[in-house]
Amino acid sequence: MNIAVIGTGYVGLVSGVCFSEIGNQVICVDNNEAKVEMLNEGNVPIYEPGLKELMASNMKAGKLSFTSNIAEAISQSDIIFIAVGTPSLPSGEANLSYVEQVAIEIGSHIESYKIIVTKSTVPVGTNDRVRELISSISSQPFDVASVPEFLREGSAVNDTLNPDRIVIGTNSDRAIKTLKKLHRPLTENLIITDIRSAEMIKYASNAFLATKISFINEISNICEKVGADVTRVAEGMGYDKRIGASFLKAGIGYGGSCFPKDTQALIQIAGMVDYDFRLLKSVVQVNQDQRFHIIHKLEEALGSLKGKTIAVWGLAFKPETDDVRDAPAIDIIQHLSDAGAVIKAYDPIATANFRKEVDVASITWEENPLHAAEGADALCVLTEWKEFAHIDLKELAEIMKDPIMIDGRNLYSAEQVQASNLQYYSVGRPGLTKLEGKTAAII
């Protein structure tokens, strides 16, 4: 099939590349000409495992191209995916200006029947607005559909090529037939529904996953007070098929481009129909508070943070991505800086992006994790990169001024901690707290 994907952010670029991988002819469109030039040279503006290689092979095969000419892309395509950003407004509502502008562009250039598919995460009713905008400009036939994405950064290529399900929302039998044919090579789990339900499925899914994360973080805080181990609690819960093991890993909370934005947007959607979504508001508050438990543990270990050197491992909101949008590290490092601490930060991929968000004189940017830890009064693990898990904790303790570790991601096992000389704090595992050379009994 001939496909145009408008927008080359995470969703648009990964979707376009993967559609070409399964045999379609794909044109990806972006109004940033410098970005288009970069993509046509084979360079990828985001870090995503496997994406660059897949993009290069499909460009070489002639199945994938990039352009800033939206009119050309529309004329050559049968299906047009809208995959532009919907950032949060100050109110928490989704900013739909980019989606609306694309709809106007489509209406201005459409010359024959097209299927217009919204892949961006949008509030309920947005696709109706897209239809209205296009119809107000063009008399050409078209259908509108909502096919939300559920990819995870860091595993986006695999998630797109091997999805749990594809949700297709439309009221057109013709569009259903075509979109089934397009997506069936990816999965047989095709969920056909109306447009508004498809729009809601995306928000409801992300809100529920965010709720699971905040729930297990609340459980971890109770575990610390009653002497239970949250990792064992989560394991025991996860075997229950009604609950499942995913998203039950305690830590310092969620970040990224989806959960924070989508939870706030759903709260606003509820408010617009005069519904107070109290549960989700609590989820958001719990998540915000959770990241500062790192600070409380540091203060418990060090007292005043002023003048102390704090090493930080991990700046991205999760491993295998360079995305730092709403990363817990932003708030944590900013607080450390405001408290007068000296920060030595390291991330294998995300440092350049993080420096665009937070770059103050009290931060030095290190080239490897041991350099960051050398001479530090304490070390905070904020992202669970694999390379951190394999570091010798005995060696680490020897190069630190004070061997204090705050493990915000529960990255290390009981055996690793017991064999080290670290003063160790984790999340919801009080039995692993190791102070003054003694490890408490493992729960």
Image: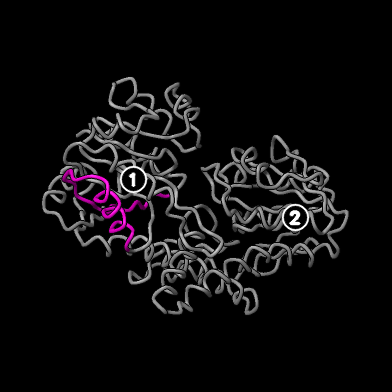
Q: Amino acid at mark 2?
A: Leu
Callout 2 environment at 10 Å: few (<14), some (14 to 19), or many (20+)?
many
Residue 400 at x, y percent in the picture: 80, 47
Q: Where in the figure is residue 171, as x and y percent of width and height?
A: 17, 58
- Left or right placement of residue 178 versus residue 166 in this view: left
Which quarter of the figure is the C terminus placed in?
bottom right
Say which residue appears at 45% left-offset and 37% top-offset.
49
Q: Is residue 132 magenta?
A: yes
**Residue situated in front as seen by the camera: 343 or 438:** 343
Please tell me whether mark 2 sits on a helix, a strand or a loop: loop
250 is within the stretch colored magenta: no
* Of 195 and 110, the residue lying toward us: 110
State the residue in front, 267 or 42.
267
Q: Which residues are magenta?
A: 125-152
Q: Position of residue 67 (x, y in %)?
A: 38, 28
Residue 394 sits above or below residue 198 on the image: above
Compared across the picture, whether 142 is left or right of 258 comes to left
The circle drawn on residue 422 is 2
Which residue: 28% across, 60% down? 198
Q: Residue most toward the right?
A: 307
| Number of marks | 2
Residue at which label 1 appears: 104
Sequence-wise, the earlier of marks 1 and 2 is 1
**Which residue is at 17% across, 48% downward?**
180
Give the alpha-carbon distance from disc 1 to disc 2, as whole Å. 60 Å
Residue 157 is at least partly visible in this image: yes
- Residue 349, image quadrant: top right
| Relative horizontal placement of residue 249, taking residue 197 as reference (left or right) | right
- Answer yes or no: is residue 229 visible: no
Amino acid type, label 1? Ile
Q: Secondary structure at mark 1?
A: helix
Q: Residue at x 51, y 57 (%)?
A: 88
